Every structure is written in structure tokens, then in C-alpha cells.
Amino acid sequence: MKIHITNIYGLGGTAGDAMHTTAELAKRVLNYNELGIYHYPFESDSPEMLRTRLDGIIAAVAHGDIVIIQSPTWNTFEFDEAFVKQLNAYSQVKKIIFIHDVLPLMFESNRYLLKRYIDLYNQADVIIAPSQNMVDFLMNEGLTVRKYVIQRMWDCPVSIDFSVIPQYKKLINFAGKTDNFKFSFVQDWKYETVRLAVTAQEGDWEHGANIEFLGWFQDQGTLANTLRKNGGFGLLWTGNEYWMEYMKLNACSKLSLYLAAGLPVIVHSSISEADTILHKGLGFVVDSLDEAVQKVEGMTEEQYNQMVQNVRLFGELIRGGFFTKKVLTDAVFQLLYD
């Protein structure tokens, strides 16, 4: 029996990075076999071309093997359906679907596809879900798979300069696309006592005096070390109500980036790992930006340094890839042992 895991090529961005990181750890540490999938215009394939392409992707799969499907492939949902259907033709092949994102929950215009996504998930033997909140939601919507593993957090295996220690500042860092509709609060920053540092170029928009521009970054390692040097806090936030509902269900890669960088974080109380942040002393859990600013203003340097120490220890899990290694191993245990 062999264990295979899908990986996407030609995609890039946060979604592509997450798949590559997961697949690389699976191959290097757990000796899983990669099934490479290229990101391409699926609609250009005839049915015969698609079957041939899928046969090539799963050529290494044999009867009785295990396939971990990183979902979605971002090659349209029809491609994902065809891929699982092709695997179903193999007798006794077990399928583990690793849910990275659920497009009908990310974008309201795709909500009509939710039932088809759940129908696809129901063909799995085990589900890897980002949070218990996500499992509960999907089960309420018709998910019937009873074997599942909770991911909780993304890994961020970056190299950190530990000679640099984050310093307490009345400063909040926000790593994200500041022109995205989900993050409009950035351009409306109104706080005079706490500075906001953003990953954008100065001049991208008209701004007040209390905005700091960090520029754009091509890789997570450089960004993580820049954030570490900048000090202060890392902010996970959105001003968009629909995206906020999604953040309650999903694992957020930016949260892991901040923690890997060594920064205490500020998160909304509704996100799936808010309790972890609170109980591990990794930052602040708040209900508004007003509250976040008040907490930053009111803390002492000693309190901040204790948070930095807590984050450093917890960050070893994220930088070392332990969440990914654990969830991929636990999923196989769920399948074969439990």
C-alpha cells in the first residue's frame, strides 16, 4: 500500500503555497508520493483529453492505495469532480479529502455550489477540516462522513533570525492585499495613538499620517523577518461580514505567518482558534478594532515580552511543520486504525 497526495503547479499565491508546503512535508518527512496537477484552463479539454490527463496524474495509484486530495485543485469544480470519479474506478482505493478552502463559503456568488461540494466530500473515507466549526457547519448542510481530523492551523516553515527580538511598540502590522474589498478597514484607519503597518507601497491610496508602508514581498521568509524586525503585533481582521463568517470556519494562513515571525497577534473573538490564542497567551482576542487599540495602548512592555516568549515556543510547531505532519498522520490513523 502506498499513500499519495495531490499537489498543484502553476497556481502561485497563498493557495498554491499552502498546497506546496503540505505536499513537500508529506514527501520529505512521511515518504508520501506526489500526484502533480497542473493549473490550466480545464474547459479546453474534450472528455477524452480529460480522461487521458487524469490517467496520467494517477498512473502511480494502485488498488488498495490511499490518496490524499488537497481540495480544491483550483481547476474548476468540474475538474475536481472528474478527478474523484476517476479514482473511484480503482477498487479499494481510500480517499482522504484535505479541505483547504470551500469556494461557496468564500464568495457569496458561489453559494449555490455548496451542495455539490458536500456531495464530493461525501465520497471521502476521511475528511481533514480546518476547524471543528467547519465540520459542524458541513454536517448541518449534509456531510455524512464521520471520520474526520481537525487541522487547526497552517504551518509556515520559514527561517527566522532569532538574534532579532520583537519589541513592544504601539504598532499593529497587517499582512494582506490592502486594496481587497475584505480589508477596506485599512484605508479607513483612524487611530492616532497606534500606528498601522501594511504590506503595500506608499502612494497606493490616500492615507492619514499614522500608516506605515512595508512594501510588497515575494516570499514568506522575507516578510516574516520584516514583521519580526518591525515588532508590535500582527492583525488578523476583516471588515466584510461575509468573509468574517468564513473566518469563523477556516484556518487562516496569515495567523500562522505572524506566529512564525514571533509576533503576538490580535484576532476577532469569533475565529476558530481564538481560544488557543487566549489560553496560550499568544496575543489579544477582541470584538472591535477600538478594543484592539485600547489593549495595545494599555499593556506594559513586561506583558508584551511574556507574550513574545509564549509565541516563540508555540511558533516552533508552525515553523517545524508539526501541524501538517500531525494531521496527515492522524488522518491515516483514522482511516486504518480507528
Image: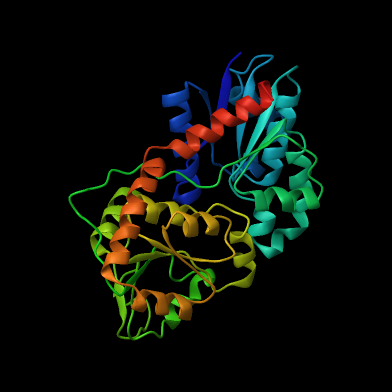
Question: Which corner quadrant of the image does residue 234 belong to?
Answer: bottom left
Which of the pair 162/238 is nearer the observer? 162
Q: Please state, as top left, top right, bottom left or bottom right, where the C terminus lies in the image.
A: top right
Which of the pair 10/229 is nearer the observer? 229
Q: Position of residue 305 (x, y in %)?
A: 28, 61
**Above or below for 248 versus 196:** above
Question: Which corner quadrant of the image does residue 123 belong to?
Answer: top right
**Above or below for 124 versus 11:** above
Would you say residue 219 is visible in this rendering?
Answer: no
**What residue is drawn where x is 41% and y is 44%?**
318
Which of the pair 197/267 is nearer the observer? 267
Q: Please state, as top left, top right, bottom left or bottom right, where the N terminus lies in the image.
A: top right
**What residue is drawn where x is 38% and y is 56%?**
258
**What residue is drawn where x is 80% and y is 40%?**
144
- Is 216 on the left or on the right of 33, as rendered? left
Q: Position of residue 66 (x, y in %)?
A: 63, 22
Question: Which corner quadrant of the image does residue 159 belong to?
Answer: top left
**What residue is drawn where x is 72% and y is 38%?**
81
Q: Position of residue 201 (x, y in %)?
A: 31, 70
Which of the pair 46/198 is nearer the observer? 198
Q: Position of residue 233 (x, y in %)?
A: 35, 65
- Is 320 on the left or on the right of 88, as rendered? left
